[in-house]
Image: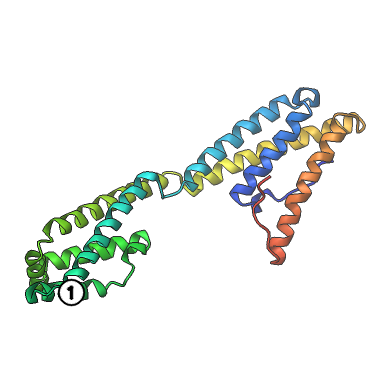
Amino acid sequence: MINNLALQTLRNGEYIQFITDTLNIVSKNNPEKLNVSTQYEALRLAKDNVEKLFKISQASLVTEELEAMDKRRDDAITGISLQVQSLSYSADAVVNKHGKTLSAHLALFGSSIARENYQSETTILRNIANDWKNKPELQEAVSALNLGSWLTELETANNEFNLAYIKRNEELAMAPTEKLKELRNTANSLYYKLRTRINSNLDINDGAEPWATTVNLLNQNISTYTLLQTRRTAGTGGTEVTG
């Protein structure tokens, strides 16, 4: 008989892999000969639905478009930082003064603004732009050093990145956890039906082939996941199964 496995404790990636493994074993032993074609096909479709939603829910926030937009604002703040730093060494007293004023202000936000995580960098750059546009001493320095175009580029790049980031978050939010749980429950029911059907045929046919080999392979696979669960419960590790 096919051994039991606590499907509900498998993580989503593990769960999908387990069902995929099960389907592969049944497929290789011929669903028609096993007399489980209907149950096999129903589980296959259910697994595909779970996997599609899981991929959406796990999709990375980092896309090529976002990376390019992030680089644009990184370049802007890096360029501004280098320019005001160089101007703070100017022999011209006025330029030197304004350069040091802006350098000191940027230093308040740390030395690696472009390396901050997305949300932190967005906030930092917004604060810098707002200060440079609204604080008299900083306004004067930006104007005197002709950094208006740099400031515009920084603010534009940061705002466009933030809008794209928010949009990406909203897209991923359309793959709710409850829907994934619902699809898993459906797949669970179909897996149990397939298991029962195979067990019944094994019993009716007195352990004949191809049921005997199929059950043996399924149990070998189940033992892998059982060991994973045991190790996790015992706190000795256990990573998601990938094959």
Q: Position of residue 112 (x, y in %)?
A: 34, 68
Image side of residue 88 versus residue 176, left or right = left
> In this view, which residue lies farthest toward the top?
32
**Which secondary structure lies at badge 1?**
loop
Q: Nearer the viewer, residue 83 or 228?
A: 83
Please state which amino acid type lies under the numbered disc 1.
Tyr
Residue at figure coordinates x 82%, y 35% from the top left: 214
Image side of residue 180 versus residue 21, left or right = left
Note whether 128 is above or below 64 in the view shown.
below
Identify the image quadrant of the C terminus. top right
Q: Is residue 166 visible?
A: no
Image side of residue 207 versus residue 189, left or right = right
State which quadrant residue 238 falls in.
bottom right
Q: Is residue 238 visible?
A: yes
State which quadrant residue 140 falls in.
bottom left
Residue at figure coordinates x 28%, y 72% from the top left: 109
Q: Position of residue 159 (x, y in %)?
A: 23, 53
Note whether 73 is above or below 214 in the view shown.
below
Image side of residue 198 versus residue 72, left or right = right
Q: Position of residue 103 (x, y in %)?
A: 21, 73
Identify the image quadrant of the N terminus. top right
Q: Position of residue 31 (x, y in %)?
A: 75, 26
Q: Nearer the viewer, residue 94 or 111?
A: 94
Q: Which residue is mark 1?
A: 89
> In this view, which residue lies farthest toward the right?
206
Query: How many other residues sit within 10 Å of disc 1, few (<14), some (14-19) or many (≥20)?
Result: some
Q: Nearer the viewer, residue 94 or 225?
A: 94
**What colouring does the structure picture have?**
rainbow
Q: Nearer the viewer, residue 64 or 93?
A: 93
